[in-house]
Image (cartoon, grey):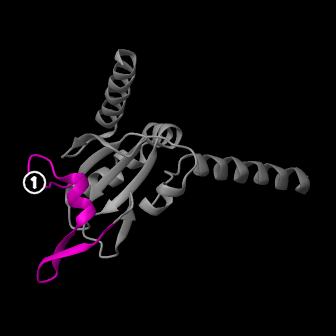
Amino acid sequence: MKFIFKLIHLFLFMTIATNMAWSQLKKYSFEELESLEIKKPTVVFLHTNWCKYCQVMEHTTFTDKKVISKLNKDYHFISFDAEQAAPITFQNHTFKYKSTGKKTGIHELAEALGTYKFKITYPTTVVLNSKKEIIFQYPSVLKPKGFLRMLEAIEDNEKTSKRTL
């Protein structure tokens, strides 16, 4: 009887562990992205630590099982703090943190990716194609359904563009 009880516990533990592994969003750094052999589009979530709307996306959109599944399957995902100080090499260029005052600043890569209509807003979702070119920017909060619709529209647009070439 003890054996069956232990077997059931082991089965439950394995089921829970498997579900947790599948529901984890795989995140990459820009450096890792450069070395990946599989070329897929990339979603960059541009945020700051103080941005309340960024936190909403982190706790709703990027914990949604459908969003996680879609991103893990079809995209590389980067969560990028626009105020991080470490230099980043991406596309053979080193981007650095720029101070804009006492204890404030912005990373040059955040400016390069997130500037939309001459300003930067948080959060901003940026989609890069497999050649790492910006194909879409959305400077606002996206809830799970809106995020998935955005990805679907981008994919439809990319398919249409390829057909017309």
**What quarter of the picture does the C terminus occupy?**
top left
Image location of residue 118, percent across then percent down: 8, 51
At a point 28% along the width and 56% down the height, the residue shown is 46
Residue type at mark 1? Lys
Residue 146 to residue 134: above or below: above
Location of residue 101 (image quadrant): bottom left
In this picture, residue 102 sits left or right of residue 65:
left
Residue 21 to residue 96: above or below: above
> What are the residue bounds of the magenta stretch?
94-122
At a point 26% along the width and 59% down the height, the residue shown is 47
Image location of residue 95, percent across then percent down: 30, 67
At a point 38% along the width and 57% down the height, the residue shown is 91
In this picture, residue 126 sits left or right of residue 106:
right
Location of residue 48 (image quadrant): bottom left
At a point 37% along the width and 68% down the height, the residue shown is 88
Is label 1 in a helix, a strand or a loop? loop
In this picture, residue 2 sits left or right of residue 152:
right
Name the residue furthest top.
164
Residue under circle 1? 119
Front position in the image: 72 or 36: 36
Image location of residue 8, percent across then percent down: 79, 49
Front position in the image: 66 or 158: 158
The stretch drawn in magenta includes residue 107? yes
In this picture, residue 131 sits left or right of residue 119:
right
